[in-house]
Amino acid sequence: MTSNTRFHIPGWMVLLGTLTAIGSVSIDMYLPAFPAIQHSLNAGSGAVQLTLTTFFVGLLCGQLVYGPASDRFGRKKPLVAGLVLYSLASIGCMLAQSIDALMVWRFIQAFGACSGIVLARAIVRDRCDPREAARSFSMLMLIMGVSPILAPLLGGYILQVSSWRVIFGLNVAFGLACLIAVIVTLKETRQPDPGTSLNPFSVFRVYVEILRDRDFSTHAIAGGFAQAGLYAYLAGSPFVLIELFHLSPSAYGWVFCANSVGLIAASQINAALLKRNSIYTLLRAGLIAVLAASMLLAVAGVAGIATMPLLLAGIFCFMTSLGFVNPNAAAASLANHPERAGSASSLLGTLQYGLATLATFAMGMIHDGTAKPLAWSMALFGLIGWAINRRFAKSG
């Protein structure tokens, strides 16, 4: 199959983009509801942020399961199981009567959601070589990018006319729609392999072998730290922009929309540049841009001048830069592992969401009623991501 043919098959790309967006739908739509959840469940703002942390813990744990399972049973069966679990857990979130119950259901919801995230990456690697995979990941960002644009706006609108629980009701509908689409339309890209062991010790050995690949570990960790800055933004921005700077939930949605547009636009420029540039060159350029945005945020935090315009400018530059980082970091990480793409995708996701969990937990713990923790954490993660790539990545 040629690359031209591949990029003219919209069906599977749209479906994979939608599956990749399941995590974004589950996060972005409820961000404007943080204050409403806090008041409804009599919880502190830090506790509400921890519902996001438990979601990332669920994503982290689930990553370790779906990849090896998909290398053993094929991609489709584990994906169906994950979507069923996601839909049931979304019902639990909708009916939760305490912040602790919401945390538990969010963990289970994430455990199911990450099936789509892991297996979409694995299916792309099944179909594509590394450079084509980077272009495909850029295209997936275009498709899934509709979610971070529309989800916060929809969440803000729902809060104007109804309860935050309706947001999780829409999660249920989204999960069921994805489940039906996968069952009816998705073709298997990996035949079951009885020789792939699911013994925990065997799975662990495979993960260790993948981690020993310098290309995988360097690009996965560097990209993961850059992306951790995004998740610090997700955890901290509802308080900073809605509570501190007094944006309405709908206005917050528009800010989120603008950042998402920048991310999507950059990912499409990245896809075009891949025709003449390597994934490694563009990844380095993206991390340099992340570094520049990090320095802007650091100045805002250290100087104590984290005003809304300066903060929004730094966040926008940071988010836009990720359009060059995320697809190329993923493609570079998976490049050397076509035969165990599921396990490599799982390990990639585990590293990324482990760092995301760290970012959101830190935001909950260092919350001090100002914008400084958000600015400082984004700056620190961006700096570390650039430094790791600068020190350990091979030229290419």
Image (tube, rainbow, N blue to C red):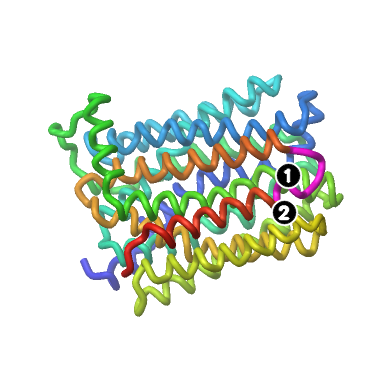
On whether residue 149 falls in the magenta region, the answer is no
Residue situated furthest front in the rendering:
391
Residue 272 x/y as whole percent: 42, 76
Residue situated furthest left in the rendering:
195
Callout 1 secondary element: helix
Mark 1 is surrounded, within 10 Å at the Cα level, by few (under 14), some (14 to 19) or many (20 or more) other residues, namely many
Q: Nearer the viewer, residue 362 or 230?
A: 362
Mark 2 is surrounded, within 10 Å at the Cα level, by few (under 14), some (14 to 19) or many (20 or more) other residues, namely many
Res 169 seen here? no
- Residue topped by disc 1: 32
Residue 287 x/y as whole percent: 50, 63
Instruction: Identify the residue at horizontal 18%, vertical 34% (top origin).
Output: 196
Report the span colored magenta. 367-374
Given the image, on which type of amino acid does mark 2 rest? Gly
Residue 245 x/y as whole percent: 85, 51
Q: Tell which circle, 2 or 1, labels the residue nearer the N-terminal end.
A: 1
The alpha-carbon separation of the residues under discs 2 and 1 comes to 7 Å
Q: Quadrant of the C terminus?
A: bottom left
Q: Is residue 210 left or right of residue 387?
A: left
- Residue topped by disc 2: 253
Relative vertical location of residue 253 with respect to residue 320 in this rendering, above or below = above
Residues tagged 2 and 1 counted as in contact (Cβ below 8 A): yes
Instruction: Identify the residue at horizontal 75%, vertical 55% (top origin).
Output: 302
